[in-house]
Amino acid sequence: MLVTSRSFDEYVAMFDLDASNLPAKILDCCAGVAGFRAEAARRGSWAVAADPAYALPREKLAEMGRDDLLRGSAIAGQYAGSFTFDWYGGPERRLTLRKAALAQFVVDLATNPSSFVAGQLPQLPFRDMAFDLAVCSHLLFTWADQLGLDWHLAALVELARVAAYVRVFPTVMQGPGEPVPFMDELMSGLERDGLRVERRQVGYEFQRGANTMLIVSRDRTRSSPRPA
Ligand SMILES: C[S@@+](CC[C@H](N)C(=O)[O-])C[C@H]1O[C@@H](n2cnc3c(N)ncnc32)[C@H](O)[C@@H]1O
């Protein structure tokens, strides 16, 4: 699995956020070496980044981020017909954004270490509803060839435990962007667990056709998440 460094601008587009009016408390879960936390915090949000990779030394994380920048570009090259650079304006711009985000991450991690939590889905070390919004970029669904239905269900229930709203992007698998084989079953499972699910189109696309995010929230019209 790659440890990637998407930028704040990519997050805003993927998750259809209003950059000038971000939620007060945000969790970036599976944040990798992304620049989102740094910029969200700079804009006044209380933002926390969680990732199991934060158990590693800082220098190792930066090294992995640099290596995976190249590996990510190689994957895009391998499946060239399956990717579009329209949103970026070209491959160079994508690389520029990713490099700048990695640099921002490295400074942020050194400056605000307590905002980076070594945590791992499907069990996070946060209290119920600690966040207004949790964003999850390129872990769920992306790696659905390795992480199955039960794991996804448990991960989304956990994210919806710690945040009022959960946004996940993309909703297809890595590489050429094949559909997730258990998506319908997953949606039914979430609804059975008392969660509200919505798939919404966004203005960002890199894997061709992958322009939909999933929104999950606790359905507060139900008195109990699991009626007997
Ligand atoms: C492809 S990277 C995405 C990083 C960042 N969100 C981005 O979009 O650039 C996937 C990240 O998921 C993290 N990860 C792997 N297993 C995880 C788990 N069980 N819970 C949370 N994060 C996990 C990896 O360490 C890696 O940093």
Image: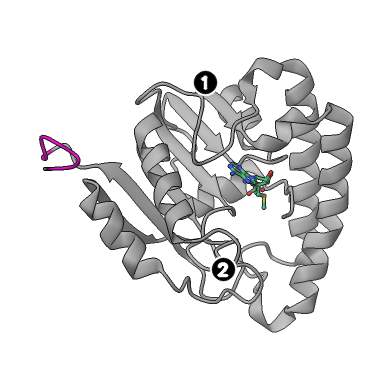
What residue range appears in magenta? 221-227
- Residue 114 within the magenta-colored segment of the rendering: no
Q: Quadrant of the N terminus?
A: bottom right
Left or right for 182, reference 185: right
Q: Is residue 148 above or below residue 49?
A: below
SS under mark 1: loop
- Asked whether the viewer can see residue 16, the reply is no
Left or right for 152, reference 139: left
Q: Where is residue 104 shown, x and y percent of the image?
A: 76, 33
In this orientation, which residue lies closer to the viewer: 22 or 174? Answer: 174
Badge 2: how crowded within 10 Å, few (<14), some, or many (20+)?
many
Q: Which residue is mark 2?
A: 173
Snapshot quadrant of residue 60: top right
Does the Cβ of the disc 1 residue fall within 8 Å of ligand 1?
A: no
Q: Where is residue 64 shown, x and y percent of the image?
A: 84, 44
Q: Is residue 29 above or below residue 38?
A: below
Q: Where is residue 83 shown, x and y percent of the image?
A: 66, 74
Dot 1 amino acid type: Gly
Q: Which residue is mark 1?
A: 44
In the rendering, which numbered label is found on residue 183?
none
SS under mark 2: loop
Q: Residue at x 45, y 45 (%)?
A: 155
Q: Residue at x 80, y 64 (%)?
A: 73
Residue that extends furthest to the bottom in the rendered view of this protein: 81
Dot 2 amino acid type: Met
In this orientation, which residue lies closer to the viewer: 121 or 210? Answer: 121
Left or right for 186, reference 224: right
Q: Residue at x 77, y 69 (%)?
A: 75
Does the Cβ of the disc 2 residue fall within 8 Å of ligand 1?
A: no
